[in-house]
Image: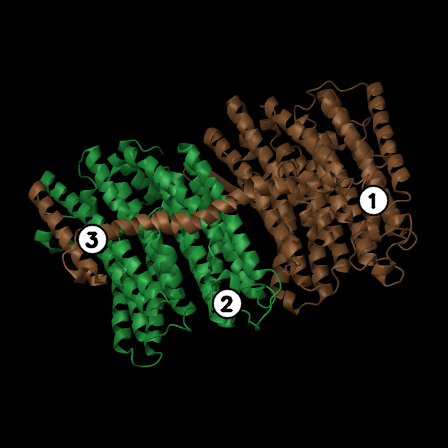
């Protein structure tokens, strides 16, 4: 297992280093091939590790690499933990990444900085794998920040565009606020348990004081809200759509943004100690899912709709975590990665065919021009809307069933969000592929063209996964399912009584009705509309004025305070006080005008003379 | 135990180099070649010392290379040198910084007198880090002022004389307190032992005193070190001075002389006056975190890149002070490591700002925009240094900052919590500056990307940033035992571990 796990991690790094060193002499195609092969190999190795783990007697294998930091009682190894959770994560991370690398070879063709793009992308996968494979919180933090900085680079990829540069910075800083949460969680855990290695933390977590446990859970939640774009730190994600679309698909939909959920799930033994902490998690998740869904109903940019949809879907995952349904959260995470990557790549194909146009009002009737993008996108749309038998139906149903037994109000919120989800996705689908042709101005009258095979092949694979992904965890299959595989990691699942089969069928029916309601509403409203102030509320379009509120409450007062400090406190108060003292001393010692000439040697002389007096006094006193 | 000759060479070689450079200053390039040669030898010497130190025995914490000669017994004047893990790191930093400053700032400053002052400064700085005698330390500490003053006042920017004067008055006044404190301590010790007057570090560290006396002496020492570091609110000389000094001068001031302040705080103020801890700790910790927040806030609004680094250094020095004053081993090891890392990172910053200034004639942020387009390599180098300064894990800054915060949190949670906010603020002001300078569309006259020479000078900086981020262990293993020794000495006064 040790060489396998190490190689999973090192392949993307090797790809990065190879392209970094040789990239200047390589062709575009060679760069893309090397980068994609590195990730594909990593995926193959993950499959091998998965098989090895299945046949191994222990489900938790620790792989020691080297001692990273060791001071006093703080001992942080660079070591990997291979267990069902980390292997599940590496499988879907490397799998989706490989597909998106392949897609990018087409999408980024003839873009400037082609090499840099793949460098960042490989480094991202390396960081993401570090995050999920680490055996301790500090090493996870390395990956955590690593994916953050790659996201920063890739969002501000078109750096000469001010909006892109600002969006990259915003993403990094919002994430940093969340990172404080992860740091504090580590400080608290280390202060009380003297270890940050997962298995040791879990073993001794029982000794944690309940208050400390709650603080740790809340700190972890803060970290998760930053990375996974939840309230109150969610509004960096829509801005992050400034990055190239494959980046939106990989980082800002399928993998990085789910890291917060992973962290919470990973720390589930600590979460178990604080029901108050978990309730907070559930509420944050449920409310975020709802709020983001309302915003998605009124966005005019195809990628913005998908971005808020991502925020909303991750809200579901966080809700599941709060409800203690960790396996359901992971199930939704994986299936969401399939269909959301599919939707983003599909939208990328649409944008590609329209020469970069992202405005829904300038699309329409694309179904007949994009023979592969259209049907695959259709699958993604049905999957996220929760129509059976697509993956989203099963995974979202799993979450909602668990939430039903945890809290009825949150369940209702979840179902309402499901209606909204089906509604905004259908609106997007209709505006893009149905209705009238509104793109002729953008394409200068020409017909849009389907994308090359490197772009459509990943779409087909992801569509198949979105169709069949539900099979990972069908409710009537208890063994050989994802939940069964993950069971050793969350040993105590089953806090709530499992609903009866009848209840499950009833809940599933509610889900289907919700999906169909949303679908029908969208079709009846948007079949012959392009925009509508009645159905696109300005309040939703402007993200509940969240950014303005932060601007008024935080950004402007803090900037004003800093500027005041720079313009008044620093020169007048502090420097003024110090200079004032110097001037006062000089004046009081004034005897001759030449002392005032302000030359260094006078100060030196005065100081030495003054010192001599003091010293003489001291010698007399002490001696 | 190795011969003290090695340490004496570390002090003498740059001294000799300075003399030689002064003698050949009339000949074009000759002085510069002498200076580079000298600092290469110095670098090699420091690496030999690092290699020999305690024969690389893990956990060994003795002062190695010790040697003492009394020069003037009635005055207690002695030449006494020794080296432990903490000073070892500072010695290597000194040699490295001077070499890089000479190579990186080559194009504009190659005059004989300039490099002679620079080497003299190196010699005095080495002396300060190696001194094992409080009076001797004071003398070296004070002597650094002279070359620094001339470097700023002769080769600085438009406001150089004002900057140099301010720097001089500030530090000289601070030193006066240190001088008085040193003499008082020496006489008090003599009075107790009824022996000869001595300022030997090992002797003075066992001086008995009341907690009141200890507090006053700590304050006297700390004022001098607070000016040098700088620690808030005695920092107002630094933005002006860093901005006006020539590149090599800014590097010397921020990467080296500032470390004399924090080194002094740890080695002398903290270690010599254990009984002062209870009284001064809350004050020092508060000043430290105020410095972190205040420095970050001003770094965000300052219009000039050099001033930005000055305010950022104020925040970084806040982290170092926080780490030292908690008395927690983990935090103190982090603080010592940060002294080194901050030195390397600041060299990187000032070299890069020097490159920018050379092209544009200005380090004002408003004059720069969109540099990433025409100068991608320069932008990439700046990014690495910036991310290290922000504390990105995997790069050097993270390890030190993390150790300080996690160590401080265990003993002084509230201060550590405020300090942790500095992590967000660092990202804020640096990324914003980066956006304004490197992002956007470049217009105006064409600028060239980093030259081969500029890239090579940055190689050691980048290598150290990455290496100490990924594998800091060899360095940590040398700092830890020495920090442990300091703590054990102070521990009876109730310093938590």
How many residues crowd around disc 2 within 10 Å: few (fewer than 14), some, or many (20 or more)?
Answer: some
Circle 2 or circle 3, nearest the eye: 3
Q: Return the residue at label 3.
A: A587
Q: Return the residue at label 1.
A: A428
Q: Under tag 2, what secondary structure?
A: helix
Q: Colour of chain A?
A: brown
Circle 2 or circle 1, nearest the eye: 1
Q: Return the residue at label 2.
A: B455
Instruction: Provide residue B289's location: percent of width, then percent of height.
Output: 41, 41
Image quadrant in which the N terminus of chain A is located:
top right
Tell me the residue at 80%/57% (across/down). Answer: A352
* Residue B62 shows up from this direction: no
Tell me the residue at 46%/55% (across/down). Answer: B302
The CA span between labels 2 and 3 is 52 Å
Image quadrant in which the C terminus of chain A is located:
top left
The CA span between labels 2 and 1 is 50 Å
How many residues crowd around disc 1 within 10 Å: few (fewer than 14), some, or many (20 or more)?
Answer: many
Which lettered chain is shown in green?
Answer: B
Q: Under tag 3, what secondary structure?
A: helix
Numbered disc 3: what chain? A
Closer to us: A163 or B74 = A163
Numbered disc 2: what chain? B
Q: Under tag 1, what secondary structure?
A: helix
* Residue B299 shows up from this direction: yes
Instruction: Provide residue A106's location: percent of width, then percent of height.
Output: 77, 59
């Amino acid at each position: 297992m040790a060489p396998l796990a190490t190689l999973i991690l090192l392949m993307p790094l090797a790809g990065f280093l190879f392209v970094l060193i040789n990239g200047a002499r390589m062709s575009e195609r060679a760069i893309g091939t090397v980068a994609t092969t590195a990730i594909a190999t990593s995926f193959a190795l993950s499959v091998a590790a998965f098989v090895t783990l299945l046949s191994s007697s222990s489900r938790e294998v620790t792989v020691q690499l080297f001692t990273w930091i060791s001071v006093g009682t703080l001992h942080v190894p660079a070591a990997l933990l291979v267990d069902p959770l980390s292997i599940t994560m590496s499988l879907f991370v490397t799998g989706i990444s490989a597909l998106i690398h392949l897609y990018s070879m087409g999408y980024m063709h003839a873009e400037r900085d082609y090499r840099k793009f793949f460098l960042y992308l490989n480094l991202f996968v390396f960081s993401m794998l570090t995050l999920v494979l680490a055996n301790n919180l500090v090493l996870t933090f390395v990956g955590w920040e690593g994916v953050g900085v790659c996201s920063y680079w890739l969002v501000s990829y078109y750096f000469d565009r001010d909006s892109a540069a600002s969006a990259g910075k915003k993403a990094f800083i919002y994430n940093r606020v969340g990172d404080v949460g992860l740091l504090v969680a580590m400080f608290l855990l280390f202060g009380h348990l003297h270890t940050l290695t997962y298995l040791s933390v879990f073993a001794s977590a029982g000794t944690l004081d309940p208050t400390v446990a709650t603080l740790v859970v809340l700190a972890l939640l803060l970290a998760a809200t930053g990375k996974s774009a939840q309230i109150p730190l969610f509004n960096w994600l829509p801005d992050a759509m400034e990055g190239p679309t494959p980046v939106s698909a990989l980082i800002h939909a399928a993998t990085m943004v789910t890291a917060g959920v992973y962290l919470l799930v990973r720390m589930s033994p600590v979460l178990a100690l604080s029901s108050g902490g978990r309730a907070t998690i559930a509420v944050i998740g449920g409310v975020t899912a709802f709020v983001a869904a309302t915003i998605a109903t009124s966005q005019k940019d195809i990628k913005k709709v998908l971005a808020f949809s991502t925020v909303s879907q991750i809200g579901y995952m966080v809700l599941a975590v709060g409800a203690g349904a960790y396996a359901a959260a992971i199930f939704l995470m994986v299936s969401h990665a399939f269909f959301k990557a599919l939707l983003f790549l599909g939208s990328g194909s649409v944008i590609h065919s329209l020469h970069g146009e992202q405005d829904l009002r300038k699309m329409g009737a694309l179904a007949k021009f994009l023979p592969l993008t259209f049907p695959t996108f259709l699958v993604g749309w049905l999957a996220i809307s929760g129509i059976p038998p697509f993956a989203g139906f099963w995974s979202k149903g799993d979450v909602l069933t668990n939430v039903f037994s945890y809290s009825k109000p949150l369940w209702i919120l979840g179902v309402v969000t499901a209606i909204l989800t089906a509604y905004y996705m259908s609106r997007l689908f209709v505006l893009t592929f149905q209705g009238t042709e509104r793109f002729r101005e953008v394409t200068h009258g020409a017909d849009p063209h389907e994308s090359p095979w490197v772009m459509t092949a990943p779409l087909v694979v992801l569509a198949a996964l979105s169709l069949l992904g539900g099979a990972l965890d069908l409710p009537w299959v208890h063994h050989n399912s994802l939940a069964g595989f993950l069971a050793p990691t969350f040993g105590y699942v089953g806090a709530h009584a499992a609903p009866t089969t009848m209840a499950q069928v009833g809940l599933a029916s509610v889900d289907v009705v919700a999906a169909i309601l949303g679908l029908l509403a969208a079709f009846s409203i948007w079949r012959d509309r392009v925009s509508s102030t009645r159905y696109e509320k300005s309040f939703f379009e402007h993200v509940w004025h969240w950014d303005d509120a932060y601007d008024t409450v935080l950004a402007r007062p803090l900037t004003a305070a800093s500027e005041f400090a720079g313009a008044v406190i620093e020169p007048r108060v502090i420097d003024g006080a110090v200079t004032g003292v110097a001037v006062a001393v000089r004046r009081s010692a004034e005897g001759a005008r030449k002392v005032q000439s302000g030359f260094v040697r006078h100060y030196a002389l005065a100081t030495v003379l003054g010192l001599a007096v003091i010293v003489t006094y001291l010698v007399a006193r002490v001696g | 135990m190795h011969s003290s000759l090695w340490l004496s060479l570390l002090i003498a070689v740059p001294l000799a180099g300075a003399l030689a450079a002064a003698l050949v200053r009339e000949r074009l390039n000759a002085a510069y070649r002498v200076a580079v040669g000298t600092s290469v030898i110095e670098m090699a010497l420091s690496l030999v010392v690092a290699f020999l130190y305690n024969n690389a025995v893990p956990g060994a914490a003795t002062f190695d290379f010790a040697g003492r000669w009394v020069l003037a017994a009635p005055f207690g004047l002695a030449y006494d040198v020794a080296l432990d893990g903490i000073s070892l790191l500072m010695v290597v930093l000194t040699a490295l910084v001077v070499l890089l400053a000479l190579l990186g700032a080559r194009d504009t400053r190659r005059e004989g007198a300039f490099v002679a002052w620079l080497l003299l400064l190196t010699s005095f700085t080495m002396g300060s880090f190696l001194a094992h005698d409080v009076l001797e330390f004071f003398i070296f500490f004070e002597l650094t002022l002279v070359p620094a003053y001339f470097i700023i006042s002769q080769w600085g920017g438009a406001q150089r004389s004002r900057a140099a004067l301010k720097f001089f008055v500030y530090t000289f006044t601070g030193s006066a307190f240190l001088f008085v404190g040193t003499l008082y301590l020496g006489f008090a010790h003599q009075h107790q032992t009824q022996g000869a007057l001595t300022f030997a570090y090992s002797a003075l560290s066992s001086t008995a005193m009341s907690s009141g006396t200890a507090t006053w002496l700590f304050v006297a020492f700390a004022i001098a070190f607070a000016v040098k570091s700088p620690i808030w609110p005695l920092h107002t000389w630094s933005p002006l001075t860093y901005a006006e000094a020539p590149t090599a001068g800014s590097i010397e001031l921020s990467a080296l002389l500032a470390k004399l302040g924090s080194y002094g705080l740890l080695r002398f103020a903290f270690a010599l006056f254990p009984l002062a801890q209870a009284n001064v700790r809350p004050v020092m910790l508060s000043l430290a975190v105020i410095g972190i927040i205040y420095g970050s806030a001003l770094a965000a609004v300052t219009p000039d890149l050099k001033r930005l680094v000055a305010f950022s250094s104020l925040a970084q020095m806040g982290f170092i002070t926080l780490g030292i004053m908690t008395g927690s081993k983990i935090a103190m090891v982090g603080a010592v490591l940060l002294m080194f890392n901050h030195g390397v990172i600041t060299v990187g910053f000032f070299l890069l700002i020097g490159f920018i200034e050379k092209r544009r004639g200005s380090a004002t942020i408003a004059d720069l925009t969109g540099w990433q387009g025409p100068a991608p390599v320069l932008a990439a180098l700046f990014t690495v240094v910036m991310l290290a300064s922000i504390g990105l894990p995997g790069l050097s800054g993270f390890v030190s900052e993390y150790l300080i915060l996690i160590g401080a949190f265990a003993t002084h949670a509230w201060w550590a919590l405020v300090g942790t906010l500095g992590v967000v603020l660092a990202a804020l002001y640096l990324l914003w500056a980066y956006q304004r300078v490197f992002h956007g569309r470049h217009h105006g006259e064409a600028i060239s990307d980093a030259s081969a020479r500029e890239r090579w000078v940055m190689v050691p900086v980048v290598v150290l940033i990455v290496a100490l981020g990924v594998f800091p262990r060899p360095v940590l293993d040398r700092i830890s035992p020495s920090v442990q020794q300091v703590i054990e000495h102070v521990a009876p006064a109730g310093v938590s571990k």
